[in-house]
Image (cartoon, helix red, strand yellow):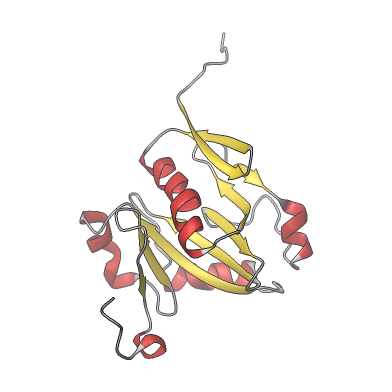
Amino acid sequence: YARTRKLHRIPVKVKAGQEITISAGVHSDLIRCIIEDFGSFFVPGGELVYVGDTGKKWGYFDQKLLVSLGVKVGHHGKMPDIVLYYRKKNWLILVEAVASSGPVDGGRHAELAKLFKNSKAGLVYVTAFPDRGEVFRKFLAVVAWETEVWCASDPTHLIHFNGVRFLGPHNAS
């Protein structure tokens, strides 16, 4: 007879005073870092809309918020690993967490653009890696243009895949 087992879960801060848990593993560790670190540095005050979970696909979903932004997805839509809403700039941040496979490449960019085509918010595509090691190097050549890359090992930096937009000198400070 099958009985419920308590498996190790990873706590993730969702909002002030609110926490969810997601399945344990490298992928889930990266998801926690994206929400807590990437979110705090690059989407300050951002609102969590969706978190996928390897154990149960829909780990967290604020469907009401997503619908208010013009996006309706069924349970068969291929959601990114994380969706954050940056109300201050009216952006939906679509993040793929890559621990072994699945960056925002050209095909995935097209899938996400189609899924979120009715969004009233601007779409920002991000691929997140644990670090700039083997997995990052494996997928670097296929990361789509017009996207961002973030590595948990360097949480205050982004790699932007479109040089023209940020071409120019940077202050050394």
* Residue in the picture at 41% in, 88% down: 165
Q: Which of 165 and 141 is in front in this view?
A: 165
Instruction: Give the number of callouts.
Output: 0
Residue 53 left/right relative to 91: left
**Quarter of the image containing the N terminus?**
top right
* Residue in the picture at 53% in, 57% down: 80
Give the quadrant of residue 84.
bottom right
Residue 51: percent from left, percent from top: 57, 48
Residue 93: percent from left, percent from top: 55, 65
**Quarter of the image containing the C terminus?**
bottom left
Residue 156: percent from left, percent from top: 37, 62
Residue 22: percent from left, percent from top: 52, 36
Give the quadrant of residue 152.
bottom left
Where 127 falls versus 74 (above or below)? below
Give the quadrant of residue 118.
bottom right
* Residue in the picture at 74% in, 67% down: 69
Q: Residue furthest front?
A: 173
